[in-house]
Amino acid sequence: MPNVLLLPGDGIGQEIVPEAAKAVRAVGERFQVDFRFQEALVGGAAYDDCGDPLPEETLRLCKESDAIILGAIGGPKWEQLPVHLRPEMGALLPLRKKLELYANIRPAVLYPGLIDASPLKPEVVDGLDLVVVRELTGGLYFGTKKREVVDDEEQAVDTLVYNTGEIVRIGRLAFQMAQKRRKKLTSVDKANVLASGRLWREVITELGKEYPDVELEHMYVDNCSMQLVRKPTQFDVIVTENTFGDILTDEASVLTGSIGMLASASIGGDVGLYEPSHGSAPDIAGQQKANPLATILSAAMMLELSFNMPEAARSIEDAVRHVVEEGYRTPDLMQSGGKEVTTADMGDLVAEYILKG
């Protein structure tokens, strides 16, 4: 019996996670799999309840689960807390570290029905299908941080550190993923300026000799950000470090029509964590306006990567494609001729298509 932990978190996380669970239950009914769900507090909701954004009980349940579906974390309400108690710093980053989730996989796929929702011209973005493999437990986000007074001025320091093993680990995963796709890997760095970037490029280049069937190219991050807008279809798999990956995946998500379409998987340890790439959107929380499709598609990644159920994963992806092609839209995707629906309505429609097969 697959054991799935639900962590709705904050803001719209409370609305979108139930829709992902709804899709997984429909998969269970169709494929005769009995999924077991548990739920726990995390982020600002956990801080409000017990003064800790990542309670020990939540961490215990995470480690005992087979997979985790996370909604969203954080919001203005908690921004004035000490750094270690803010939802992002006190829950999300420690969760990735404690579960050894060193790789974040974020596909960016443009569904034909949403081509007019993309800010790029149809002829530029048509056929977009790429995946970003982001190193998740190193770099600036996890390096030593300090603030100090130097010559009567306040100074802040963030340390960017990578070692060979961390780069090999994420690089190997990216090469293997490229082998299963279109056999092209773009490694993104800032080797012309950063010492960590030069090490990154050297290690990836050497590793590439083990994968002669994969075309390897190197690209500076500033050029990559431009190329994603100029010609996004040139990319297959992109591998990059933590900070660059965070920024580039948000850019890639908008090309698909909405950040509400971008799913993600964080893997590497015994338990995978699956979440949409957007934030908690407190401005629309509780209004049933949130797009649950990224969370639902994250659940599809969970079925494939954590439970080895590729057919079940395809059933969710096909259902999402069907719903989009039928013109159903949450407000972020709404365009002329679309059928506007609520968050729960969208979840119901996807579940219905899953059951129909």
Image (cartoon, helix red, strand yellow):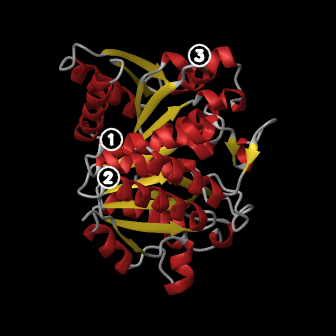
Q: How many marks?
A: 3
The residue where tag 1 is placed is 311
Residues tagged 1 and 2 counted as in contact (Cβ below 8 A): yes
The residue where tag 2 is placed is 31
Q: Does residue 96 appear left or right of residue 113 in this picture?
A: left
Q: Residue furthest left?
A: 210
Residue 331 appears in the figure = yes
- Element type where label 2 sits in the image: helix
- Which of pointers 1 and 2 lies earlier in the amino acid sequence? 2
- The local crowd at label 1, few if under 14, some if 14 to 19, many if 20 or more residues have their Cα within 10 Å, is some
Find residue 350 and report its horizontal and vertical position in percent: 54, 50
Residue at (51%, 83%) from the top-left corner? 51
Q: Does residue 329 appear left or right of residue 196 in this picture?
A: right
The residue where tag 3 is placed is 231
Residue 246 appears in the figure = no
- From the viewer's perspective, is residue 142 above or below residue 56? above
Real-space Cα separation, disc 1 to disc 3, in angstroms: 32 Å
